Image (cartoon, coloured by chain):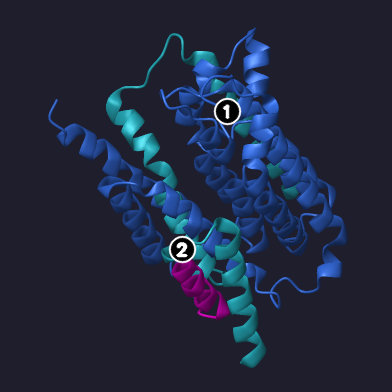
Amino acid sequence: MSAVWVSVTVVGLATVAIKAAGPLLLASHTPPPRAQAALEHLAPALLAALVVTQAVGGDNGGFTVDARLAGLAAGAVALLLRAPLLLVITVAAVTAALVRLVT
Amino acid sequence: MQHPRSRPSYLDGVRAAAPIGVAAFAFGLSFGVLARSADMGRVAPVVMSVTTFAGSAQFAVASILGAGGGLVTAIVAAVLLNLRYGPIGLSAASALEGPWWKRALTAQLVVDESWAIAQRHDGRTDRHLLVGAGLLLLVTWTTGTAVGAFAGELVADPESLGLDAAFPALFLALLWSQVRDRSRLLAALGGAAIALVLMPFTGPGVPIVAASLACLVGARNEARRPS
């Protein structure tokens, strides 16, 4: 099995199990407050790391600064102006495309 | 969309999710194109959209495999990203009924957006809104993935369209809705800092996994809270 199908299978099975776990276990279990609080903070920590790695990550590790960073900055401005998700992403993509067009 | 008297129907859930369904289609399309460019083939991304059905984890797998990161790194990052469905599942559990297999199956329709749309004023989750919204998002996400994976070459080079800049913007927008208080902001800043520090020294993906340690900010804050 190729790496792609292994990842699709393992991630798929793990996600199905994680999504089902809460509804199946709830009746008997509630995590202690500190564990629950930590779990609830996983998403912002991981999403922030993804923003960084996707914006300035190089192909083989390290940093690469290119049009993605300009796109992200434009997307952030759109967010500040309370634009909906679709518009934020479109603004980022169009900005990066324009920067690549003129550089 | 929610009438004060009548109980919401499945169709109300579909209607409520329609605008975000458009975004889900567009991002399914992006995921299909990204997965192709990451050498994931055409069928695997579509299978993944149906079975995993969690955008950020799927993007993470495609990004890490495409960037030459390890298989284990990709799986660990995706599973860590989806760990949030543990507490979200606990929150949605009260809305699910029937035998265990039916509850487990319905729980697969829980994604951030369907769960958020289904929140009622009394703090419980509405099953009809959850199922309607979840089904619409599953269909639009998977259809978008299939179009992107099979007809992506018609869209030309993703980078010339700036699609690679759409991913950090997507994660920033999702992060934006997550950072509702000081401790979540600290977790986000900590995660970003850990990733930045590790990036020059480790392979792609490892910084993301390490950044999950920033979630301990939440436990620390909880311990400090006077009770």
Q: Which residues are magenta?
A: A64-79
Quadrant of the rendered image containing residue B8: top right
Using the image, name the chain to which the residue with label 1 belongs: A
Quadrant of the rendered image containing residue A5: top right
Depth check, front residue: B216 or B99: B99
Q: What residue lies at 54% left-to-right and 33% top-to-bottom? A: B115
Secondary element at tag 1 = helix
> Is B181 situated left or right of B191 in this image?
left
Residues at marks 1 and 2 on the same chain: yes
> Is B15 situated left or right of A51 in this image?
right
Most frequent secondary structure within the magenta stretch: helix
Q: What residue lies at 33% left-to-right and 48% top-to-bottom? A: B214
Q: Is the N terminus of chain B in the top left, top right, bottom left or bottom right quadrant?
A: top right
Whichever of labels 1 and 2 marks the residue nearer the N terminus, that label is 1
Shown in blue, the chain is B
* Disc 1: which residue: A19
Q: What residue lies at 67% left-to-right and 13% top-to-bottom? A: B101
Depth check, front residue: B140 or A101: B140
Secondary element at tag 2 = helix
Residue A15 position in % (x across, y down): 61, 33
Identity, as a three-letter code, of the amino acid under mark 2:
Leu
> Is A23 situated left or right of B43 in this image?
left
* Disc 2: which residue: A79
Using the image, name the chain to which the residue with label 2 belongs: A
Colour in which chain A is drawn:
cyan
Q: Is residue A13 visible?
A: no
Is residue A75 part of the magenta span, yes or no?
yes
